[in-house]
Image (cartoon, rainbow, N blue to C red):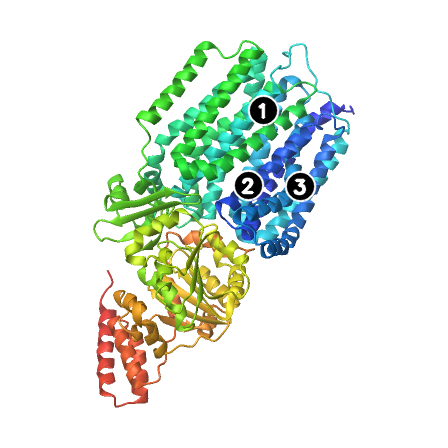
Amino acid sequence: MAVLDATERRERSLPFLLGLFFFSGATGLIYQTLWARRLHLLFGTSQFAVATVLAAFMAGLGIGGFWMARRADRIEAPLRVYGLLEVGIGIYAVLFPWILDLTLPLTLNFYTTVSPSPLVFGIWQMGIVGVLLLLPTICMGATLPLLARFVSTRFHSVGSRIGILYGANTFGAVFGVWLGGFFLLPWLGQSTTNHIAALANLLLGVAALLLSRNVGERSAPVMASSDDPDPPVSAMGALMWVAALSGFAALVYELAWFRLMCLILGGSTYAFSTMLLAFLVGIALGGWLGGKPADLSLQRWGAPGPLRVLVGVQVAIGVSSCALMWVYPELPYLFVQLYDPDSADLGLSWMRQVWLAVLVMTGPALLMGASFPLLVRAVASRDGLGRAVGRIYGANTLGSLFGAVLAGFVFLPRLHVLGAVGVGVVVNLLAALIAGVESQRVGRGVRPAFLAGGVLTALIAGGLVVYHPPKWDPLWMSAGTYKYVSDLSDRSRAGVESFAVEDYELLYYDEGFSTVVTVARSVETGNIWLANNGKVEASTTVDMLTQVLVSHLPFLFAPQAQRVSVIGLASGITAGALTLHPAVQEIEIVELEPSIIEASHAFDTMNHRPLEDDRVELVIADGRNHLLFTPTETWDVIVSQPSNPWLSGVSNLFTREFFEMGRDRLTEDGVWSQWVQLYGMGQEDLRSLLATFRSVFPHVALFSTIEDADIVLIGSKKPLRFGIEDARRILEGAVGEQLVELGVQGPYDLLLHYLMDEAALDLLVGGEGLNTDDNMRIEFSAPHYLHSSTASENLLFLLRESVIHELDTIEDNLALAQAYGRREDWTRGMVVLKRVLDAEPGHAEAAVLFREYRALFQAAQATPED
């Protein structure tokens, strides 16, 4: 049997090595998702916190690339070192949750001891995140230049090998997004997914060590033949600038496209996974396919060849990204056309949404991926391949870091989506210019005709942007079709435009740091509404009763509450309702998005101008993060009014750990008030949410504010008892005036909203699984019901164990029955009347009303539904 030499063994090991690097990319994306989730629980989901985590991750990758660039060409056994790096990543992943837990008391002590300004505390957070992520991300960033040196044994195929290696790793990242986002995290939760990924890394490391023994320890030289062209003589510094600018533009595009697609696909975790998949598929395909053209360009044109192609690729990225801006206005309508009302399958719905993300992202991303092997091919030498890969990768990654930070903090808030994309286009053209100049320096560079064509194309694109800019109608683009498409009776273009634009007057629009904020008024009804990323969060009609009751109901149980915290400003109506209580001395409003502040002034005629009240302090911060750093037993009342729990990030405000945090920040007699939407989640999700709330608060009261829409949960450490006198007290003064305007004519009308106490709630949800930070149960389950009519079903579920408030006197019970009658709730009205007749069988008025309600109930039952 013939004995294979070292080079042949390396060649035969390539498919196995690509498989290892594929799964290494998968675990890397799973870690990025997991670690970002855990860090956001500690540091919040503000734009600063998100940018900090992303910057720390990318900085580590870039440093890892530069670090290994200096060593890869001298390491005797690159595959063995790679195996040790994978083992190290796996071990760190196992330890990461424990390490993160150790940082919490450290951060709390720093906050309470130093009382830092927001800037100082932000720097502290950046330092902590950097320390936490630096070691594993450096290891991840070091793997590509290390393996690039191992797999490239023939100089003429360096581009192909680097492209295949880069593509395999990125395809692994695609697989990691798909597997983690759609299966592992929804089914197993964060801890188990982390353990699986860590085990995978350990197995990858062991497999690499075994493969290293099989193929030989010493690194093979990069061989050349007599037909190979001369090595490139490009300046590394210039090409590192091109790599950095290319990475900068890529992240600007990515964040701008994500902002755009949030308006089209929504903000669920599945929508974000879909966007990331579309982007990474393009990068992976470009890397995989771009290596061969890089080699051919060198063979045909010599040293200037890869640079000439690179110029064309960079121009094509900019021009295609620019051209696609004219597609953006079609996306809301395309979403409506792709929507299938007969399909409740989230998987099928996701497949249709993928095409929209692919339409916007994948083409330019493919060209971005192709840039990497071209850059490496342009600077790689026979004895410096690892150095070339490491430096190009490091520069590209650090450029991405700055692109992400500036896009999030400057370009998107100030220039909006179209302006941010325009910045990316300019940066790509600048990168093309540098590459073109460099190609002229090293030989026969870009042909004049090609250069003239590129300049002309750029001028045409720029002229179109200036003189015929792409249309961006705020009402149309923020119509929230991802949420409201199921409400459309006419899905033609005219029908969609009528629904989204024609009836509304735009009052406010801003693409803020974390969301797109829209405020509009209905011309027909006068209703003013506020939307985040197209999802309506507040209004002056249908939402009014919940917006005010979530503030007033806690005062049934804490009439002398003086210190109140509100999580979320939105329209300001909820916070304004609190200012009507004379006992309140301090109101803190915590709002994540600064644009909401200006937007809330559109509601000044309805919200009592809370921001002008001397008792109010506005804090711009993530609600959960701010609560975490609030001392225990601070507040008498906390009002939490987040958006729906199916939204990623918002879901962190519905977990057991968050409710526990809130309970501990309440005084001994304090009360928590929680707004919960009945729509947009299934019955199991509602059961889980109620069970989670009940597991934290010893005493609970549940109120229905708007039937088939909203409930309010009241939680406390003390028993929650109230009677008709408490209801009368609530209706005194300005509070009563506000509630009367909303149909609460008297104390009995207020009692109609009461559904149950903790005993009834236990019968309803006892034994149901809880929603925790680890399992994220509702975040992953609720999006399945986004277009299902679950509100009525959920209300009927609550009514199974609902109770009717028992009053002491016959007169009060009779008045309560009459209030139910005004509401046309004949069943519950008859229950109350039965109480009266049981206590006083001869009560004439009660008997007459009972017969009347029974007849009305029977008539309603006999009337067929529409």
Instruction: Work out which residue is located at the far front of the displayed protein and give it.
Output: 614
Of residues 456 and 567, the one nearer the viewer is 567
Indicate the quadrant containing the N terminus: top left, top right, bottom left or bottom right.
top right
Q: Earlier in the sequence, mark 3 or mark 2?
A: 2
Three-letter code for the amino acid on which mark 3 is drawn: Leu
Q: Are marks 3 and 1 in contact (CB under 8 Å)?
A: no
Q: CA distance from mark 2 to mark 1?
A: 21 Å
Q: Earlier in the sequence, mark 2 or mark 1?
A: 2
Q: Residue at x 39, y 16 (%)?
A: 456
Q: Is residue 592 above or below residue 859?
A: above
Q: Is residue 129 above or below residue 696?
A: above
Disc 3 crowd rating (10 Å Cα; few below 14, some 14-19, many 20+) is: some
Residue 162 left/right relative to 150: left
Three-letter code for the amino acid on which mark 1 is drawn: Met
* Residue 585 in sight here: yes
Which residue in the protein does label 1 denote?
240
Which residue in the protein does label 2 denote?
54
Tell me the element at label 1. helix
Picture quadrant where residue 703 is located: bottom left
Indicate the quadrant containing the C terminus: top left, top right, bottom left or bottom right.
bottom left
Q: Residue at x 31, y 80 (%)?
A: 832
Residue 767: x and y in percent read 52, 68
Q: Is residue 483 above or below residue 658?
A: above
Which residue in the protein does label 3 denote?
135
Three-letter code for the amino acid on which mark 2 is drawn: Leu
